[in-house]
Amino acid sequence: MYENMRRLVSMAAFAVIALGALAGKPVKAFFTVTPKMSCANCEAKIKKNLRYEKGIKSIVTSLDDQIVTITYDDEKTNPQNIIKGFKKIGYTAVIADEKAAADCKKSKKSDCKGKQCPDTKKK
Ligand SMILES: [Cu+2]
């Protein structure tokens, strides 16, 4: 009886590990982009386009921090691929670490705020 239980538990543990390997684990990466995001349209553009990139699970943009936080499946993509995705829509993205993101939040830099969006400038 006890032996059966133990087998069941180890089988369940194995199933969890196997499932985990199949899906990959969600990983967060932080990016800064050039040109900077200057309005809600910039944010929408990034979210709308990168959402369809393989392995990307969620995208959070912040105008205040100038940080794009992307959660991705590490079995399906990686930060280098995500950077290529940014390139496709005209952004040069650089990986920012979590500390840099936090520092930016603290300093509340807004040198890009109020500036015209590069998209609207062209028109
Ligand atoms: Cu904009």
Image (tube, grey):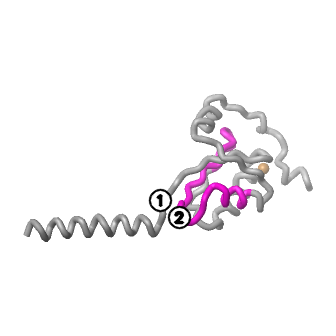
Does label 2 or label 1 sit earlier along the sequence? 1
53 or 22, which lies in front? 22
Side of 64 relative to 19 (left or right): right
Instruction: Indicate the secondary structure of the residue bearing disc 1.
Output: loop
How packed is label 1: few (under 14 Cα within 10 Å), some, or many (20 or more)?
some
Q: Residue at x 72, y 60 (%)?
A: 84
> In terms of image quadrants, where is residue 106?
top right
Name the kind of residue labelled 1 in the image.
Answer: Lys
Task: Name the residue: 70% across, 52% down.
Answer: 43
Coordinates of residue 41 in the picture (x, y in percent): 75, 53
Q: Are marks 2 and 1 in contact (CB under 8 Å)?
A: yes
Image position, residue 19 (x, y; %): 39, 68
Q: Which residues are magenta?
A: 61-86
| Quadrant holding the N terminus | bottom left
The numbered mark at residue 25 is 1
Kindly identify the residue that appears in the image at 80 percent across and 39 percent down: 114
Residue 38: mark: none
**Residue 97 position in % (x across, y down):** 60, 41
| Alpha carbon distance from label 2 to label 1 | 7 Å
Identity of the amino acid at label 2? Glu
Q: Quadrant of the C terminus?
A: bottom right
Locate residue 17 relative to residue 35 in the image: left or right.
Answer: left
